[in-house]
Image (cartoon, rainbow, N blue to C red):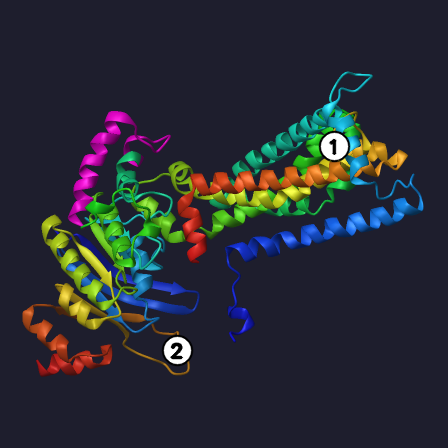
């Protein structure tokens, strides 16, 4: 008998084992839901799959009676737009500031402590300020995401730039590179995959800020809908929305990972050897 | 005229003297190998030549002019590791220097200009024996091949001096022997002036035309940092010296070996 640490599951076993917890949760839900519905058929806490399917049908497949829109897709589009805009702005500004901070000591000296201080401000605490300054429109929601994740991204990128071996920077200088050329040819390309990695890590926080902002002031969006139907205890809507948000988060993460592997094969080969 | 002149060169960090009173002249085409115990200042000396450190006292002249205390085009460098850019293919690594020269803003060349730059780069890459690996990334190359690439990358700039910081320290003995042949042939062909730090005295004798031993002349046991290292031996190396190299195992034995020869 091999030691436990040396027993590795094969392909089929890994998939089966990986799916097992999901199946168990589903079964557990079904049993609990049936038990509650048997007691009270109007129970709203654990709706049956058929009533969830009904809710999905009403939200996603039939147009809203009042507006004629498909609420579910409208919410999804609104949320994804805010999220990608917020994350995009954050990533771009973090790339610029982070790379400059990491590369140029005279910029790092004044900016680095300031960014560190900024990153410690709890973004949710300044959400009211954002609503006051930017109004209740799209801008304040996007700004919350930007303010929430940019300082983290900047600090991470700065750190990654500082981790580039000094030998490379010296070598580039002996090849005749100027400061600017070192940034565009040596530092920036090596920072891109690292930026994608930190964006993936910050997506969780971005979703958090998005849903929080939508919950407080919005007229559409996934977070808005969840908090709206909470008033009616509509678990049949909340549950599929939560699953959908999780799925979107997973897909975004997967997409970023694919892009990174496709565009920066040298980076992934490097990190796996290390 | 001398290529490099070292005039009363000192390097101190606070009260710690690392190098003291170096006076040497190096002519074009010399291959200087530098040996010495760990922490005796040979890397500091290389950093002075490279320009990442500046002398505390004295002067370091290149072609009669003080050397700029910043790494520049007249110096080529190959480190023990991290000398090539991991995000560029072999070809891109070597083409880089001409791209930097002709394209100050983007640092990139396209179309015809790029093709032109590639031509001489490919010749250089073939000269170091990497012609089959043009499109490969450094992580796909072995340690020895990465060092070959680093050499090609530096040599295409035609540097006035080439600095090698234990370039073969991390390689297997067999590969190292191949690299010795490569360096010697490149040195002859391009008439290079080379400074090479090595831990391996035999390598020092085998490759160099001149061998420097860095060591402290005086040691005060109460203040080990009070005196810095000097070049205690400056040996012209010829075939007979290479034979004495066979007998030598450690720097302290040089004295005995040289005395016997």
Quarter occupied by the C terminus of chain B: bottom left
Q: Which residues are magenta?
A: B100-128
Of residues A244 and A96, which is closer to you in this image? A244
Image location of residue B18, percent across then percent down:
35, 68
| Image-quadrant location for residue B23 | bottom left
Q: Is residue B125 in the magenta section?
A: yes
Image location of residue B143, percent across then percent down:
29, 58
Dot 2: few (<14), some (14–19), or many (≥20) neighbours within 10 Å?
Answer: few
| Residue identifier under label 2 | B224
Q: Is residue B175 in the magenta section?
A: no
In the image, residue B210 sits, relative to residue B134, either above or below, namely below
Label 1: element kind = helix
Instruction: Name the residue located 10 percent from the left edge and 83 percent from the top edge.
Output: B260
Q: Residue furthest right?
A: A40
CA separation, marks 2 and 1? Answer: 70 Å
Image location of residue B245, percent across then percent down:
14, 75
Q: Which mark is residue A222?
A: 1
* A179 with respect to B156 (left or right): right
Q: Mark 2 — on which chain does it sit?
A: B
In the image, residue B172 sits, relative to residue A177, either above or below, namely below
| Image-quadrant location for residue A222 | top right
Of residues B24 and A41, which is closer to you in this image? A41
Q: Are marks 2 and 1 on the same chain?
A: no
Instruction: Name the residue located 22 percent from the left edge and 34 percent from the top edge.
Output: B117
């Amino acid at each position: 008998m091999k030691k436990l640490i040396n027993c590795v599951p094969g392909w089929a076993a890994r998939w089966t084992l990986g799916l097992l917890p999901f199946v168990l949760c589903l079964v557990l839900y079904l049993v609990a839901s049936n038990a509650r519905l048997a007691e009270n058929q109007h129970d709203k806490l654990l709706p049956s799959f058929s009533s969830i399917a009904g809710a999905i049908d009403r939200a996603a497949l039939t147009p809203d009676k009042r507006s004629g829109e498909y609420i579910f897709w409208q919410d999804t589009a609104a949320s994804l737009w805010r999220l990608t805009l917020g994350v995009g702005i954050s990533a771009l500004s973090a790339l610029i500031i982070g790379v400059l901070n990491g590369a140029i000591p005279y910029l790092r000296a004044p900016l680095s402590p300031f960014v560190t201080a900024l990153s410690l401000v709890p973004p949710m605490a300044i959400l009211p300020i954002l609503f006051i300054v930017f109004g209740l429109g799209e801008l304040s929601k996007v700004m919350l995401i930007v303010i929430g994740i940019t300082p983290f991204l900047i600090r991470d990128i700065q750190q990654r730039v500082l981790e580039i071996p000094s030998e490379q920077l010296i070598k580039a200088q002996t090849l005749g590179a100027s400061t600017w050329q070192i940034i565009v040819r040596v530092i920036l390309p090596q920072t891109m995959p690292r930026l994608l990695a930190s964006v993936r890590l910050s997506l969780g926080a971005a979703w958090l800020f998005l849903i929080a902002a939508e919950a407080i002031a919005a007229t559409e969006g996934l977070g808005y809908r969840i908090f709206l139907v909470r008033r009616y205890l509509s678990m049949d809507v909340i549950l599929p929305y939560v699953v959908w948000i999780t799925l979107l988060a997973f897909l975004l993460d997967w997409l970023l990972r694919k892009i990174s592997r496709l565009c920066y094969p040298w980076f992934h080969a490097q990190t796996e050897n290390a | 005229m001398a290529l490099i002149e070292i005039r009363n060169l000192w390097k101190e960090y606070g009260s710690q003297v690392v190098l003291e009173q170096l006076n040497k002249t190096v002519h074009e085409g010399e291959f200087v190998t530098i040996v010495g115990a760990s922490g005796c200042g040979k890397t500091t000396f290389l950093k002075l030549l490279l320009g990442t450190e500046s002398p505390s006292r004295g002067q370091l002249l290149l072609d009669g002019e003080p050397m700029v205390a910043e790494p520049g085009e007249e110096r080529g460098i190959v480190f023990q590791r991290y000398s090539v850019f991991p995000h560029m293919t072999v070809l891109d690594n070597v083409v880089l220097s001409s791209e930097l020269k002709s394209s100050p803003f983007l640092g990139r060349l396209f179309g015809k200009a790029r093709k032109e730059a590639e031509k001489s780069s490919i010749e250089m890459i073939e000269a170091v024996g990497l012609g089959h690996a043009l499109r490969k990334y450094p992580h796909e190359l072995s340690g020895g091949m990465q060092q070959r690439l680093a050499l090609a990358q530096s040599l295409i700039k035609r540097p006035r001096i080439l600095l090698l910081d234990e370039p073969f320290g991390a390689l297997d003995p067999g590969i190292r022997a191949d690299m010795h042949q490569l360096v010697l042939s490149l040195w002859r062909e391009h008439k290079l002036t080379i400074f090479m730090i090595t831990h391996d005295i035999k390598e020092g004798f085998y490759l160099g035309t001149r061998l420097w031993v860095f060591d402290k002349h005086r040691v005060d046991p109460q203040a080990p940092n009070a005196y810095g290292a000097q070049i205690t031996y400056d040996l012209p190396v010829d075939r007979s010296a290479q034979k004495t190299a066979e007998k030598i195992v450690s720097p302290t034995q040089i004295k005995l070996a040289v005395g016997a020869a």
